[in-house]
């Protein structure tokens, strides 16, 4: 039933199509947000799930499917199913990554027996992923490199290394602790000629601002801070994974030096 309550939660309101969405229909979802691929956090709007599902059905059944009562009913029921599954995983509110939402849509289509539509949706996601990858490569080639000052020398920022550092700091902290929003926020606070020390401080602050979204970011923040301490003490870049071996080498020298 479309109006049945999720166990242990308040009832999920019927999801309208985007053109029919009202403030009251969206009010139940104010404590939920979506993390987009670029790291931006936006409001959770179930109506957009309906739109995506309808497009998938139209790709298989043609434009006449929009006028089909059975298609509209299937879209509404699937939307409700996806929303319930998402809310069940975050009963007190929280954030969903866009990829997780789309995974639930795929699963809902398969479980509902809409295999052709599910296949069309999967192919659409793959095509969009390829387009995004192509756009990223084009943008990387076109945009000027950000220069940083490291050890008194100007050099191009190694964005891959920075991304790997942040990704390592977020590893193993749960699916909701993602490196992308931390990296995006870090980059927004950088400028040409920024000292590397400030780059790492920007990453720490970026992770700290997300603690309200998920407490796991507090551990990511601590790991990034620990990286700056290691860098200051050892005088070089050492990852968290490398530290176990390096600590065994460094500690005896430290004791000997006094």
Image (spheres, rainbow, N blue to C red):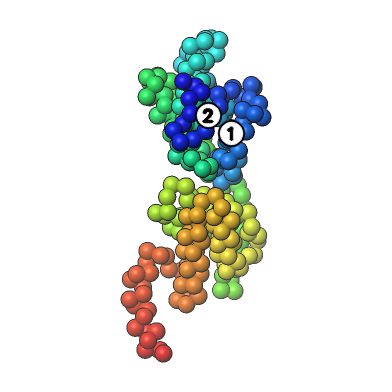
Which quadrant would residue 138 be assigned to in this image?
Answer: top right
How far apart in space, not on screen, are marks 1 and 2 (Cα)?
7 Å
- Residue 26 visible somewhere in the drawing: yes
The residue at which mark 1 appears reads as: 28
On residue 66, the disc is none
**Which circle's residue, 1 or 2, is located before the other in the chain?**
2
Which quadrant would residue 111 be assigned to in this image?
Answer: top left
* Residue toward you, 101 or 179: 101
Is residue 138 placed above or below 150 in the rendered structure?
above
Are dots 1 and 2 in contact, CB under 8 Å?
Answer: yes
The residue at which mark 2 appears reads as: 12
Q: Which element type, helix, strand or loop, lies under badge 2?
A: loop
* Residue toward you, 183 or 92: 92
Q: Position of residue 143 (x, y in %)?
A: 61, 49
Q: Position of residue 239 (x, y in %)?
A: 42, 65
Q: Position of residue 118 (x, y in %)?
A: 41, 24
Q: Which element type, helix, strand or loop, lies under badge 1?
A: loop
* Residue toward you, 244 or 22: 22
Task: Give the residue displayed 41% in from the left and 24% down from the top.
Answer: 109
Q: Position of residue 39 (x, y in %)?
A: 56, 46
Task: Give the residue displayed 49% in from the left and 72% down from the top.
Answer: 229
- Residue 164 visible somewhere in the drawing: no
Quarter containing the C terminus: bottom left
Label 2 neighbour load within 10 Å: few <14, some 14-19, many 20+:
some
């Amino acid at each position: 039933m479309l109006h049945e309550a999720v166990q242990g939660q308040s009832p999920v309101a019927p999801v309208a199509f985007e053109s029919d969405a009202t403030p009251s229909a969206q009010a139940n979802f104010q404590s939920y947000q979506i993390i987009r691929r670029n790291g931006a956090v936006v409001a959770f709007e179930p109506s957009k799930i309906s739109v995506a599902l309808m497009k998938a059905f139209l790709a298989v059944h043609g434009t006449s499917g929009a006028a089909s009562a059975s298609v509209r009913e299937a879209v509404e029921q699937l939307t409700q199913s996806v929303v319930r599954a998402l809310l069940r995983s975050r009963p007190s509110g929280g954030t969903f990554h866009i990829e997780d939402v789309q995974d639930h849509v795929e699963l809902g289509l398969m479980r509902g027996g809409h295999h052709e539509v599910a296949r069309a949706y999967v192919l659409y996601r793959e095509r969009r992923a390829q387009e995004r990858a192509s756009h990223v490569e084009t943008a990387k080639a076109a945009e000027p490199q950000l220069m940083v000052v490291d050890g008194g020398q100007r050099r191009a920022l190694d964005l891959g290394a920075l991304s790997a550092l942040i990704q390592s700091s977020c590893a193993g902290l749960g699916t909701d602790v993602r490196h992308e929003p931390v990296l995006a926020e870090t980059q927004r606070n950088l400028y040409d000629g920024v000292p590397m020390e400030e780059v790492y401080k920007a990453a720490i602050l970026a992770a700290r601002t997300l603690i309200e979204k998920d407490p796991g970011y507090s551990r990511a923040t601590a790991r990034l801070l620990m990286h700056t301490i290691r860098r200051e003490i050892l005088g070089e870049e050492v990852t968290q994974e490398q530290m176990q071996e390096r600590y065994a080498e460094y500690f005896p020298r430290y004791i000997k030096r006094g």
